[in-house]
Image (spheres, rainbow, N blue to C red):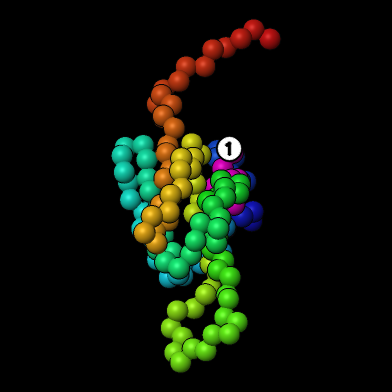
């Protein structure tokens, strides 16, 4: 018996990317650091907000890699000559990934009061019914 997957089913053409997306999502970790919000700001736009207190703009990078928004943070730990009696604020690095649908692009990234806002916009939708012209061969 042959196992049918999204990419091998004869009626589902071009869904191999969806299968790869599902595999990528199952491998990604949904840990708690840094905490984040996702909000819809209009019919065609979204905002991801990460709480990145203690990070500067130079400590953060925002990239899009193969339709995946990747936000990385790396603080430099300058503890030379400092003696901590208690250390509750750790300088740690993070990587947070979000898979973007086709037609969703990063519009802007803004740092404000310890929050990193990444604005996303969806391009205008194509018509639901599209007539394809048949050309002579």
Front residue (pair 29, 73)? 73
Residue at image point 42% right, 39% down: 121
Q: In this view, does 111 lie above or below 53?
A: above
Q: Residues within 10 Å of mark 1 (few under 14, many from 20)?
A: few
Residue 95 visible, this angle? no
Residue that sits furthest to the right in the current view: 137
Q: In this view, does 114 lie to the left or right of 11?
A: left
Label 1 element class: loop
Residue 100 visible: yes
Q: Residue 73: horizontal and vertical position, in percent?
A: 54, 63
* Residue 20 falls inside the magenta stretch: yes
Question: Which SS type dominates the magenta stretch?
Answer: helix
Give the magenta part as a residue range: 13-23
Expressed as whole percent of the image width and height from the top left, the position of residue 3 reads 61, 55
Q: Pick whichever, 32 or 83, lies toward us.
A: 83
**Quadrant in the picture for residue 75:** bottom right
Residue, disc 1:
13
The answer to which of 131 and 43 lies nearer the viewer is: 43
- Residue 10 drawn above or below residue 110: above
Q: Residue at x 40, y 26 (%)?
A: 128
Image-quadrant location for residue 24 = bottom right
Quadrant where the C terminus is found in the figure = top right
Q: Which of the 4 quarters of the picture holds residue 28? A: bottom right
Q: How many badges with numbers are in the image?
A: 1
Q: Residue at x 49, y 78 (%)?
A: 90
């Amino acid at each position: 018996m042959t196992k049918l997957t999204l990419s091998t089913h004869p009626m589902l053409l071009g869904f191999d990317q969806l299968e790869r997306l599902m595999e990528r999502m199952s491998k990604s970790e949904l840990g708690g650091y840094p905490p984040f919000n996702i909000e819809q700001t209009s019919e065609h736009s979204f905002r991801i907000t990460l709480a990145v207190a203690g990070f500067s703009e130079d400590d953060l990078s925002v990239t899009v890699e193969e339709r995946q928004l990747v936000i990385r943070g790396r603080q430099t730990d300058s503890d030379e000559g400092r003696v901590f009696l208690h250390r509750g604020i750790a300088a740690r690095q993070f990587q947070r990934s979000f898979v973007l649908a086709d037609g969703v692009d990063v519009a802007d990234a803004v740092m404000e009061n310890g929050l990193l806002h990444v604005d996303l916009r969806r391009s205008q939708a194509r018509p639901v019914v599209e007539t394809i012209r048949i050309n002579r061969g």
